[in-house]
Amino acid sequence: MAAGDGVATATAVVAAVPARKPRPITKESPIAFRPRPGTRGRLEKRAGQRSLSVVVELAVDAYLGRKVVDVDPSLRAALAAELSEVGDRLASIEHDERGVGRNLNQIARFLNTYREIPLGLAQELREANKIHERVLTELAAIRGALDRLVAAHEAVA
């Protein structure tokens, strides 16, 4: 049709919609705890010129297994032998616990598949309990060794 025959033509104008800005990352709310008596003093002593928040954050990162860069290299070197022994003991515990987990999964699979209790179940569970008791004893020994290391380091510092 020609433009002059009385029919209006419309042209569409498409405007670009601005992209929505991403939401800013909000910080998590603080974690509050009431330390045991003497903990604040020990933290302040260890903090030196740093704020307590920094020291607590480093401790939490270390607990969670995150890489902590702010560790004194001389302290790391002094504790390397003791900590490698602790690491070896923990690796042994992990191996034992993985074995117990596999055994319990096999028992659960058997029970779910056959809907009956195997004849040797009591013996299997006794063995698993023995391993767990050894693990708990070993963990208590590791905790004691770590506590002694910390106490010795704090006595020097």
Image: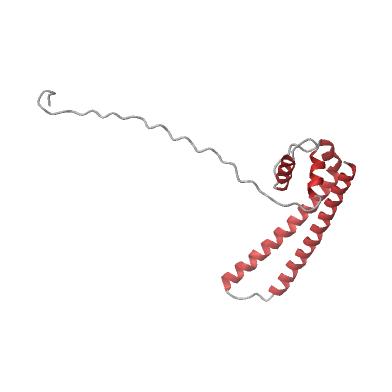
**Image height of 15 relative to 39, above or below:** above
Residue at image coords 28%, 28%? 13
| Image location (x, y in percent) of residue 9 | 18, 28
Colouring rule applied to residues: secondary structure
Nearer to the camera, 37 or 147 = 37
Is 11 on the left or on the right of 52, as rendered?
left
Is 154 on the left or on the right of 112, as rendered?
right
| Image location (x, y in percent) of residue 127 | 75, 68
Residue at image coords 76%, 56%? 93
- Answer with the quarter of the image where residue 118 lies: bottom right
Q: Residue furthest left?
A: 5
Q: Quadrant of the N terminus?
A: top left
Residue at image coords 81%, 50%? 38
Is 21 on the left or on the right of 100, as rendered?
left
- Answer with the quarter of the image where residue 26 lies: top right
Q: How many marks?
A: 0
| Image location (x, y in percent) of residue 154 | 86, 45
| Image location (x, y in percent) of residue 2 | 12, 24
Q: Quadrant of the C terminus?
A: top right
Nearer to the camera, 5 or 46 = 46
**Image height of 60 relative to 112, above or below:** above
Nearer to the camera, 65 or 151 = 151
